[in-house]
Image (tube, helix red, strand yellow):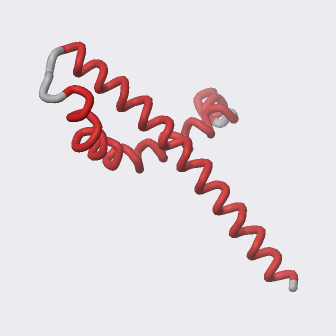
Amino acid sequence: SWINKLLNRKIFRHAGQLSYALFLNHAMVIDLLKDQIYPLLFGSAESFSVMLLKNIIFVVVLTVYSIFTILIVNKLVQTFKQKRCAAVQK
C-alpha cells in the first residue's frame, strides 16, 4: 500500500532506528535529569515556564544521547563484523 511505500523510504528507516534508541534510553535520561540536573538548575520551582523548559531540555538531551548511542552501537557492530570476517578468512 502507499503507507508501506512511504514508510519504507530511507528517512523513515532512520527515524525508526532513532525511535527505538529513544525508547531504550528515555528512562535513564529521565532519572538522570530528575535526580541530578533539574535540582541544580531550578531548585524546587514548579511554574509553567519551568516545566516547559524542563520538557525542552529532556527532549534535546534524550535525542542527542540517543543519536550518540546509535553511532556507538553501529561502530561496534561494524568493528565486530570486520574482526569476525578476518578471523574466518584466516
Residue 8 versus residue 89 in the image, above or below: above
Viewer-side residue, 33 vs 41:
41
**Residue 47, x across and y down, in percent:** 16, 16
In this picture, residue 90 sits left or right of residue 55? right
Q: How many marks?
A: 0
Residue 79: which quarter of the image?
bottom right
In this picture, residue 22 sits left or right of residue 72? left
Quadrant where the C terminus is found in the figure: bottom right
Residue sticking out furthest to the right: 90
Q: Residue at 53% of width from left, 49% of height from top?
A: 69
In this picture, residue 46 sits left or right of residue 52? left
In this picture, residue 57 sits left or right of residue 38? right
**Residue 65, x across and y down, in percent:** 48, 42
Quadrant where the N terminus is found in the figure: top right
**Residue 80, x across and y down, in percent:** 69, 69
Viewer-side residue, 13 vs 90:
90
Viewer-side residue, 83 vs 1:
83
Q: Residue at 42% of width from left, 35% of height from top?
A: 61
Residue sticking out furthest to the front: 40
Residue 88: which quarter of the image?
bottom right
**Residue 87, x across and y down, in percent:** 79, 82
Q: Residue at 65% of width from left, 32% of height from top?
A: 11
Viewer-side residue, 31 vs 37:
37
Residue 79 versus residue 43 in the image, above or below: below
